Image (cartoon, rainbow, N blue to C red):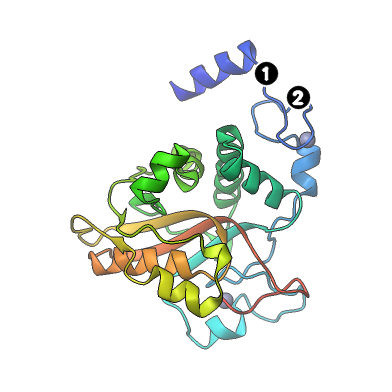
Amino acid sequence: MHAKVDQALDWLCPRVCVFCGLASGPDACCPGCRDDLPWIERPCCGCGTPLAPAHPTDRCPGCAAGADDMRIVSALIYAYPVDRLIASAKFRQRLDFAGALGEMLGAYLCGLRGEYALTRPDLIVPVPLHRRRMAARGFNQAEEIAAPVARRLGVPLRADVLRRARDTPEQTSLTGRARRRNITGAFTAPRSLNGLHVAIIDDVWTTGTTARAVARAAQAAGAGAVQVWTVARTVGPRGRSHDP
Ligand SMILES: [Zn+2]
Ligand SMILES: [Zn+2]
């Protein structure tokens, strides 16, 4: 059904690449722009941080030491032009851009093979927005990104299993410690997650404070396993980050 509707829409209004504006076929971006994007080709299997080509194992030193119990996957490095697309989606209300970001994340997740292959979750849950902010903005960026991912993976999207109980300031305006103080206890779960495996979706992994707080709320509600998937992640000045 989806495929037929998509086909009809492609014929009625052909899609154009979100980066260069050229015809892009069924995808949100054309093959040329897709090839030029800063994909994370060799991530750590634990925290998703990009590893140097010469790194001897598939885990960063922190994850090799057993630092984390949840898998984090990011598709792209948060750099031009991905950063522009994410900012435009959020602040210029470009829902089509958010959908395109979700398509890119979905394609990346589907392409993970071998030691990178995903464990399929039971639910996909976007990082919730407080209802006041939702009312002001009109949409939740994370939910718009999550929708194409859920469709592509055939996993139910559930935006109602977690709530943002407190309206917190934008994390980007705060320092590390203030971020953690700002977000602690901001998320709640109205009902039990009963052993379900949950994949949490957000736009960018920066310090991970927000996504970790959401993951903790899911675990406190009884989630059996939690992963975090983001479109992009920031990396250190030398292009590597071992700090999840
Ligand atoms: Zn293009
Ligand atoms: Zn790692």
- Per the model, the C-alpha gap separating discs 1 and 2 is 7 Å
The answer to whether residue 91 is above or below residue 68 is above
Q: Position of residue 146 (x, y in %)?
A: 47, 45
| Residue labelled with disc 1 | 14
Q: Position of residue 21 (x, y in %)?
A: 77, 29
Q: Residue at x 41, y 61 (%)?
A: 168
Looking at the image, tell me whether mark 1 or mark 2 is earlier in sequence order. 1
Kindly indicate the quadrant of the structure image that contains residue 174.
bottom right
Per the rendering, the mark at residue 23 is: 2
Is residue 94 visible in the rendered structure shown here? Answer: yes
Q: Residue at x 48, y 84 (%)?
A: 67
Q: Residue at x 78, y 75 (%)?
A: 238
Secondary element type, mark 2 = loop
Query: CB of mark 1 within 8 Å of CB of mark 2?
Result: yes
Q: Residue at x 64, y 27 (%)?
A: 26
**Residue closest to the eye, 53 or 37:** 37
Q: Quadrant of the C terminus?
A: bottom right
The answer to whether residue 113 is above or below residue 24 is below
Is residue 154 visible in the rendered structure shown here? Answer: no
The answer to whether residue 19 is above or below residue 233 is above
Q: Position of residue 204 (x, y in %)?
A: 57, 58
